[in-house]
Image (cartoon, rainbow, N blue to C red):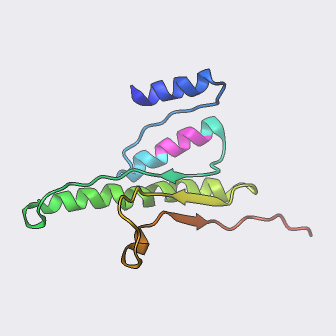
């Protein structure tokens, strides 16, 4: 399995690695994977979302279910991942950032500005000095 091979390679380089696979379109699977990883490694510091799919074809010939599948992965996959890690990120004083990214192969323009990679800042939690 490719994921296990990558994990073994990182471990061989003295990295600490835990693996959990999930279908990002399934919120329950994402929640389970995040729980597994936080149990193994502790709270989340950074999340990078890069799952996505595209189905080329003529718009009028594509099955409407394909559009739903793309939204489930491309949009809700990111929503599911961010929702799963935010409680973990907010539980630490050191974590402050969630990163989401999508590969864009076209030159950014003002009309496609919303497609640029996004950086979402989560407010730092500070202990009261009282």
Q: Residue furthest top?
A: 12
In the image, residue 7 lies at what x, y percent? Answer: 52, 28
- Residue at the image point whose x is 21% and y is 54% from the top: 55
Q: Is residue 20 left or right of residue 70?
A: right
In the image, residue 48 lies at what x, y percent? Answer: 52, 52
Give the main secondary structure, helix, strand or loop, of the magenta stretch.
helix
Q: Where does the N terminus fall, quadrant-wise?
A: top left
Q: Residue furthest bottom?
A: 110
In the image, residue 35 lies at what x, y percent? Answer: 54, 43
Which residues lie in the magenta part?
32-38
Q: Is residue 48 above or below residue 123?
A: above
27 is within the stretch colored magenta: no
Q: Residue furthest right?
A: 130
In the image, residue 114 lies at what x, y percent? Answer: 42, 72
Q: Quadrant of residue 99?
A: bottom right
Q: Is residue 28 above or below residue 104?
A: above
Q: Is residue 107 above or below residue 92?
A: below
Q: Residue furthest front?
A: 107
Count of all numbered marks drawn on residues in the image: 0
Please tell me which residue lies in front, 122 or 107. Answer: 107
Q: Is residue 54 above or below residue 129?
A: above
- Residue at the image point whose x is 41% and y is 55% from the top: 103
- Residue at the image point whose x is 53% and y is 23% from the top: 8
Q: Is residue 28 left or right of residue 13?
A: left
Q: Where does the C terminus fall, quadrant-wise?
A: bottom right
- Residue at the image point whose x is 36% and y is 50% from the top: 26
């Amino acid at each position: 399995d490719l994921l296990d091979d990558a994990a073994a390679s990182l471990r061989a380089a003295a990295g600490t690695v835990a693996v959990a696979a999930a279908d990002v379109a399934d919120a329950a699977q994402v929640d389970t994977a995040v729980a597994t990883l936080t149990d193994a490694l502790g709270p989340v510091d950074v999340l990078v979302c890069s799952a996505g799919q595209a189905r080329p074809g003529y718009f009028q010939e594509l099955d409407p279910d394909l559009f739903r599948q793309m939204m489930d992965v491309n949009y809700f996959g990111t929503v599911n991942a961010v929702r799963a890690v935010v409680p973990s990120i907010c539980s630490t004083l050191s974590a402050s950032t969630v990163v989401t990214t999508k590969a864009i192969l076209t030159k950014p323009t003002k009309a496609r500005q919303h497609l640029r990679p996004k950086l979402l800042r989560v407010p730092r939690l500070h202990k009261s000095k009282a």
